[in-house]
Amino acid sequence: MSVDKPDSGRLNGEDDDPAWDVDPDDEWGLAVLETVGQQLKLHREAAGLRAGEFGALVGYGEDLVYKVEGGTRIPRPEYLDKAEERLRAGGLIRAMKEPVAKVQYPKKVRKIADLEAKAVEIGLYSNHNIHGLLQTEEHMRALMGVWLPTPTEAEVERAVAGRLSRSSLFEKSPAPSLSFVQEEVTLRRPVGGTMVRRRQLERLLELGKLPNVSIQVMPSDAEDHVGTGGLIEVLKFSDGTAVGRSDGAFNGRPVTTPKQLRILELRYNMIRTAALTPRESRALIERMLGET
C-alpha cells in the first residue's frame, strides 16, 4: 500500500504530556483504548509501516505510537484524523473518535454525566462558583486558568470537554426538570474580566427562559441560610430512585437511602424558599448585566 510523504512538523511535548495518559483504574476506558490500539496497529501493519515510519508520517514520536497501540495513551483527535488520512482506512479509524472522546473525560465526569442523563429531576445549589452546567466555555477556561498548580493545556482541554459534554442535558428530549440556586457572589465575581462576565450573565438569562429550567439567586444579605454547608445536588430518576450529595453532609459522599435523601431535600427546599424567585432572580441578573 502506498502512502504520502511525511508531515514536516511534530506536535511539541506530545510524547511527554501525562494529561493524555489513561487512568489505570478506568476499566472501561482501558478496554476501549486496548481495542482502538489493536485496530490502529493492524491498519499500520497492513500498510507495511513500522511504528517509527508511521510516526514520521503523522508527525508524532515513535514512543507515542507504541503507547497508543498498547492502549496506555489516549490518542488526540488529530492523531486519529492523520491516521485515517495516511492509512486510507475508509472511515474505520474515524469511527473510533466518538468512544475515544468519551475516554478523554475523567471517569468521575463520565459517571456524573451518565447520572444526569438518566435523571428526570435535578436540583443543584452552588455557593462557590457558578455551577458547571451553567458555565460558558470562556468562564470555564478563566476559572481553570488560576488553578494551582497551573494545569497543562491538555489538562484544561480535557476538563473543558468534560463540562461541555454535560451541557447537552439542556437539549435532551424529553427534557428533565432542572432547578438551580446560585449564591449572588458567584454572579458578581468578575471571572475572566468584563466581557467574559457579560457573556456568562447572558447565558444565565438564556437558559432561564427554557420552560424546564429554574434559576434562583440567593442574596448575599440573607440572614438565615441553611446552605452554609456547601454544594447540594439531588437527582431523581424515573423508577423512583434518587441520589444526592452535599459538601456539608455525610462526609460529601453520594447517598441513596430515603432518610439521607430527605435531609438533603429538606435543606435544598429551604434554600429555594429563602432565595429570590426565578422572576426576581432574572431581574437581578439583568441589573447586573446592565451594570457591567
Image (tube, helix red, strand yellow):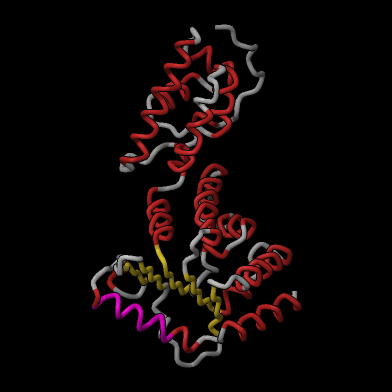
Quadrant containing the C terminus in the rendered view? bottom right
Residue 13, above or below 205: above
Q: Residue at x 42, y 81 (%)?
A: 228
Q: Residue furthest front?
A: 174
Q: Nearer the viewer, residue 1 or 230?
A: 1
Q: Position of residue 86 (x, y in %)?
A: 58, 18
Residue 207, above or below 46: below
Q: Nearer the viewer, residue 118 or 73?
A: 118
Residue 90, above or below 201: above
Q: Residue at x 55, y 80 (%)?
A: 216
Q: Position of residue 27 (x, y in %)?
A: 31, 40
Q: Position of residue 74 (x, y in %)?
A: 45, 34
Q: Is residue 9 magenta?
A: no
The residue stretch that appears in magenta: 259-270
Quadrant containing the N terminus in the rendered view? top right
Q: Quadrant of residue 279?
A: bottom right
Q: Position of residue 251 (x, y in %)?
A: 29, 69
Residue 71, above or below 181: above
Q: Residue furthest bottom?
A: 223
Left or right position of 122 against 137: left
Q: Nearer the viewer, residue 283 or 120?
A: 120
Q: Residue at x 60, y 10 (%)?
A: 3
Majority secondary structure of magenta residues: helix
Q: Quadrant of residue 145?
A: bottom right
Q: Nearer the viewer, residue 48 or 158?
A: 48
Left or right position of 240 against 49: left
Q: Residue at x 57, y 17 (%)?
A: 88
Q: Is residue 260 magenta?
A: yes
